Amino acid sequence: MKRPFHATLFLAQLCTGAALADGIQVIPNGDQASMAGSADYFTGAVVVDMLVTPTEYSQVSGAHVTFAPGARTAWHTHPRGQTLIVTSGKGWVQEGSKDKQEIKPGDVVRIAPGVKHWHGATDTNGMRHIALQEAVDGKNVEWLEQVSDDQYTK
């Protein structure tokens, strides 16, 4: 018997990777400890709170990332692109040699596959966003060089 489409079940599947045939899986808030962003991939104070990790059903991962003023990612790319949903504060995102763009709460940033970019807080305001990306062959990001202070302030 074919199941009807239910938006709630679809969202549960998207967020947790659970298949419709498996029902709904609730992952309690706080089940995963907060992590400091690695100095290999971030500049400044960054806290990463994982929301979803890949499963056998879905290769999507997501985190709520908190950047202190001046904090940012290194340059990087994603094989299937990335979506950022800004939840608080004020930040910047930049693609390659293009001008950086301001991002603020409610903004959704869609980054195409393979696009070299960075994102983080402004120099005077912290920023939080939800970052969603999909893995290809178990890899969801290619980290590159750090964003220099000159690149960041330009």
Image: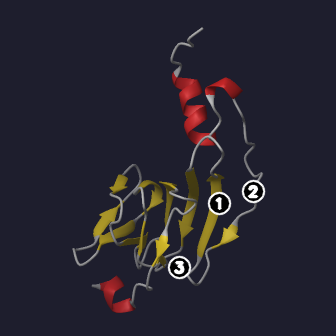
Q: Secondary structure at mark 2?
A: loop
Q: Is residue 23 visible?
A: no
x then y, percent, for residue 153 = 32, 85
**Mark 2 and mark 3: span between their CA atoms?**
20 Å
Badge 2 amino acid: Gln
Residue under numbered circle 1: 49
Q: Is residue 114 above or below residue 109?
A: below
Q: Which mark is residue 42?
A: 3
**Circle 2 residue:** 32
* Vertical comparison of 77 with 59: above or below: below
Q: Kindly state the secondary structure of the residue where label 1 is placed.
A: strand
**Are discs 2 and 3 less than 8 Å apart at CB?**
no
Considering depth in this image, is 125 or 129 the residue closer to the camera? Answer: 129
C-alpha distance separating marks 3 and 1: 15 Å
Quarter holding the C terminus is bottom left
Camera-nearest residue between 151 and 141: 141
Quarter location, residue 81: bottom left
Q: Earlier in the sequence, mark 2 or mark 1?
A: 2
In contact (CB < 8 Å): disc 2 and disc 1: yes
Mark 1 crowdedness (10 Å alpha carbons): few <14, some 14-19, many ≥20: some
89 vs 11, nearest the viewer: 11
What kind of residue is marked 1? Asp
